[in-house]
Amino acid sequence: MKKLGLFLIVSLFLIFSCETSEDAETGSEAISSNLVGTWKLIQITSEDGRIGSATSTDTNYFEILYIGEGSNLDVQMTFAENPNALDITGEGFLYERTVTETTENIEVTGEGIIADQWTFAYDFFAPGNGWKVEEEKYIFDHVDGSLRVDYGPEILEVNETTLKLKMKYNDDYPKSGQYFGRETCVFYATFQKI
C-alpha cells in the first residue's frame, strides 16, 4: 500500500510539473519575443581592433592595433514579428579608434585617433530581410543567416529594457575608396528599449 501511495504521489508530481511541448517556448522563441520592439543605441565600443595587410606575406605589410568608441549615437532598430522584419533608422555614429600599437613602418601623428562616420545599418545588420534568433544567442539578419559578419551578433543580455550585443566585424579598409587592407574587431553595443 505504501508503494502504491508513493507511486501516486510521484505520478501526480510528474503530471503537474511537466509542460507539453505546445505550452513551452523554446529559449530562442522567448528571446525573440523580448526583442520585438524599438531599441535605441546608447553605447558602442570595440576591442581587439586591427587595421592591416590582409596577409603577413604582403611586401608592404602594416598593422595598426586599436580600441574604439562611438559617439553622437543616432541609431534605432525595430524588430517586428509576423513577418519578422528589421528596420534601422538614424544617422549612425561617429566611430573613433584610438591607436594602441603599430608596426615600425607606420607613424602616428597627433592624438592617434582614426575617426569616421558609421551607419550601423549594413555595417552590422541588413534591414528589411527578416531576422531570427538561433541557438538562443545569435541574431541573424536574414532568413538564410547573417549577411555581414562571420556569425550573427551574439546576444549577451536581453530583457524588457536592455539589449547588449557582441558583434564580430571583418571587412575591407577603408569602407569606401581604394582598398588597402582589412579591418577586424569585436564591437559591444548596448541598446535601450523605447
Image (cartoon, rainbow, N blue to C red):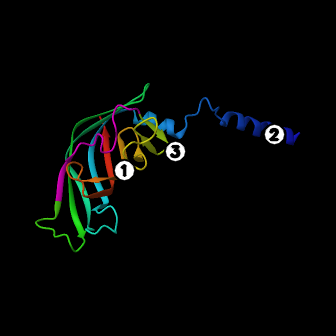
Three-letter amino acid code at disc 3?
Glu
- Which is in the foreground here, disc 1 or disc 2? 1
Check the image and report above or below for 63 versus 120: below
Three-letter amino acid code at disc 1?
Met
- Which is in the foreground here, disc 2 or disc 3? 3
Residue 158 point in image, percent of width and height: 41, 43
Region rendered in magenta: 114-130
Q: Which residue is mark 2?
A: 7
Q: CA distance from mark 2 to mark 3?
A: 37 Å
Residue 22 point in image, percent of width and height: 61, 29
- Circle 2 SS class: helix
Check the image and report above or below for 143 versus 136: above
Left/right placement of residue 55 relative to residue 70 reads: right
Residue at point 42%, 28% (across, down):
81
Residue at point 24%, 49% (across, down):
175
Q: Quadrant of the N terminus?
A: top right
Q: CA distance from mark 1 to mark 2?
A: 51 Å
Residue 79 point in image, percent of width and height: 37, 32
Q: Which mark is residue 135?
A: 3
- Circle 1 SS class: strand
Q: Badge 2: how crowded within 10 Å, few (<14), some, or many (20+)? A: few
Q: Which residue is mark 1?
A: 167
Which residue appears farthest toward the bottom when viewing the image? 104
Q: Earlier in the sequence, mark 2 or mark 3?
A: 2
Q: Nearer the viewer, residue 154 or 103?
A: 103
Q: Are marks 2 and 3 in contact (CB under 8 Å)?
A: no
Q: CA distance from mark 3 to mark 1?
A: 16 Å
Which residue appears farthest toward the left when viewing the image? 110
Which residue appears farthest toward the right when viewing the image? 1
Q: Nearer the viewer, residue 174 or 5?
A: 174
Task: Name the quadrant containing residue 115.
Answer: bottom left
